Amino acid sequence: MSQTVVLGVIGSDAHVVGITILEQAFSAAGFDVVNLGVQTSQEEFAEAAKAHDASAVLVSSLYGHAEQDCQGFQGVLEDAGVDAVTYIGGNLAVGQDEFEETRRTFRELGFDRVFDSETDPEDAIAALREDLQITPTESERATISS
């Protein structure tokens, strides 16, 4: 499998640990990962996704201001000609009490999947494989079941 994912931390957020873990997990799962790092603009996501013909754009945010940072994000991707699955995850809202409300907000902003900060990377990988209709190889299935 040679599917490319672009990932980064959007806006002014400088939390790097989460995307480092995601980069390692997605790479180990066979994805080609382009890690944009922290404090990534919407335009940087779009440019990288276009340049690398990404199948998915994975947005991370932990400082609680993702809703503001993601306003118009889907439009920026569309304007750049990016046709990719979009995921967002982390601590997306300050005082986030009811995650289903937060999930609804980000789905309305156009994200295909929305994950909370407790999501295991393997769950995001399984979701991406499902969304991209990727069947795990025999060795990957053996690793998953062990």
Image: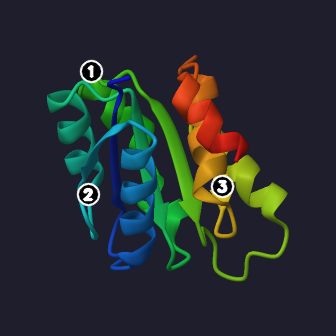
Please state the horizontal and vertical placement of residue 128, each as a whole percent of the image: 56, 34
Q: CA distance from mark 3 to mark 1?
A: 25 Å
Foreground residue, 31 or 75?
Answer: 31
Disc 3 packing (10 Å; few <14; some 14–19; many ≥20):
many
Residue tagged 2: 41
Tell me, yes or no, if residue 46 can be seen here. yes
Tell me, yes or no, if residue 72 can be seen here. no
Please state the horizontal and vertical placement of residue 104, each as a whole percent of the image: 75, 48
Q: Give amino acid for label 2.
A: Ser
- In the figure, is residue 95 to the left or right of 40? right
Residue tagged 1: 81
Residue sitting at the far left? 51
Foreground residue, 28 or 67?
Answer: 28
Q: Secondary structure at mark 2?
A: loop
Residue tagged 3: 115
User: Which of the two marks, 3 or 1, is nearer to us in this view?
Assistant: 3
Q: Residue at x 36, y 62 (%)?
A: 10
Q: Residue at x 19, y 30 (%)?
A: 52
Upstream in the sequence, badge 3 or badge 2?
Answer: 2
Q: CA distance from mark 2 to mark 1?
A: 17 Å
Upstream in the sequence, badge 2 or badge 1?
Answer: 2
